[in-house]
Image (tube, grey):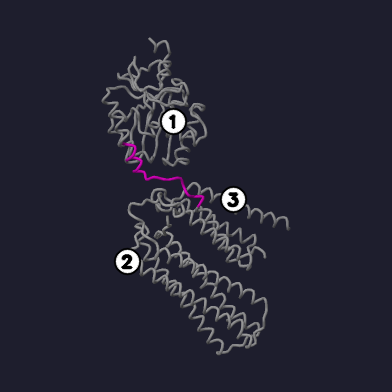
Amino acid sequence: MRAQILYRPKIILLSLFVTLVMTSFSVFFLSRLDNIVNGDLYGYGLRFSYEWANQYWNYLTLITGFLGVSMLITCASIALTLPQRHTHKIGSAKFVTSILLVMGILMFVLSIFLFTRLDNIVRGDLYGYGLRFSYEWANQYWNYLTLILGFLGIAIGMSGVSFVLTFIGAPIPETQVLPSLSPLLRINFTRLTFYLLTSIGAIALAFSINYNSSILAFIGLGLIFWGMILLYIKPENHVKENLLDKTTLPSLTNLNQIVKELGYKGKGVYLSPKYFKGFESSKVYINTRKDMKLPPTKKIQDEEDKIFIKNPNGILITSPGLELKRLFEKKLGTNFTRVNFQYLEQNISKLLVEDLEIAREVEIERENDRVFVKIENSIYQAMCKEAKKLSKIHCSLGCPLCSAIACALAEATGKSVVIEKEQTSDIDQTTKIEYHLLEEPKEEQTQK
Amino acid sequence: MTFPLGFLDISLWLAIAAMILLVTSQMLSPHYGKINIQIDRKKLKNVAFAISILFLATVAMRIISIILAQ
């Protein structure tokens, strides 16, 4: 199968941006080179004469002019490509951009040609006007000369890449999604930027050592540093807050409907780990009657994998916050069954605020068998508010965050937990939850 | 062929980089950021602290060298 070059506006934009930066560097180093010729060389016996000066100035003006025009052309190309970065359609801008890019490349080539002529004046003609050779000025001059030519070379290369992608690049078909592209053409923008920044930075550093230029060393260090930073600070995938609500609420609504239609009237009881064989399960028991009487431990242990429990009739469901509780444990590097309430009290605020960034502030307080949790500005605020409309979820199973905390409490305290109250306030963006730690019934009493 | 930057240059570079990173990590909003450029604030803050510590280390080294030279 023949490999097809696709139209990639982001790569084109990046190439054009690099071209612009390289051209700016060339103009900067050209001015430094001009300072040597128009200043330092007079200290090495050079006599001023319009004969060489006119020719030199002409070339310099032309080079500066060409570089200025090519910068404008690059800017225009960026402006034409920018609207296509999301659509990936070339449209009518294709030919205009291609022509502009060809003109830009021509400008660069002409600049290099004129630059060699200018170099001939300095390295040839000026000796006829009293200039004495010295490595002091020559080394600096050669450094700037090489840098300018190097930067212009990179600029031509980058413009060439942009031209090829613009002119030959085929538009991505509507139906074609990025993952189906061949691995060679699947380019990660962040990774590409990292490679580009670090490689340019490394080249600049190498040049800086070779030519003893502190400016280049700073540029190189900066580019490598930002390239590394860009790769390091790339986060795990973040999703928008409203997506969280939209994807979780239907499951909660379904759960609410099922519990309601099956006629389970009791409150959800987050069972303590002793009810399970592996101590890893986190399940909620809902009784058919309104009371919170729990079946014997042995019975739940035996029927741990079942949903419906008989005698007393009830339902045993996985808590909505189980996975979130597991994430808490993973972040804390422990299991809640191994810690006590004090540990939870000391760590939950840091966990939710700093580690997971799901709330702005968390307060937890215990009064005998009651635990009060106040969560400020949580990402689950809207969901908790929506869950209020679901009678079997609100104040019973709770929203995923309330549920996860209930699971953690049940495991850390070793007591079964019930969500007594759950209040959300839009004014101060807080969610207040009151948990009730149930006294574990004696086996003899429960078995009767 | 020597590296053109001296100890003080590196120290200055570290100071500027640390300041930029610290200010950026504090000012970044996780909610209203540009979606295409995703940044983990915590990691950025860690880098900022690391660079700040490096800068302070260079300052400490400078102070020690001044004291020892007297």
Q: Quick check: A384 left or right of A104?
A: left
Residue at figure coordinates x 65%, y 53% from the top left: B60
Front disc: 2 or 3: 2
Front disc: 2 or 1: 2
Q: Quick check: A286 left or right of A136?
A: left
Image: A99 above or below A42: above
Secondary structure under tag 1 reads strand
| Tag 3: amino acid | Ile
Residue A92: mark: 2
**Where's residue B57, x and y in %?**
63, 52
Residue extending furthest front?
A1
The one nearer the camera, B64 or A308, is A308
- Magenta stretch: give its range: A231-249
Real-space CA distance between mark 1 and mark 3, rounded to the nearest whole angstrom: 37 Å
Read off the residue under disc 1.
Answer: A365
Image: A261 above or below A362: above
| Tag 2: amino acid | Ser
Read off the residue under disc 3.
Answer: B53
A99 in magenta: no
Q: Chain of mark 2?
A: A
Crowding at mark 2 (Cα within 10 Å: few <14, some 14-19, many 20+): few
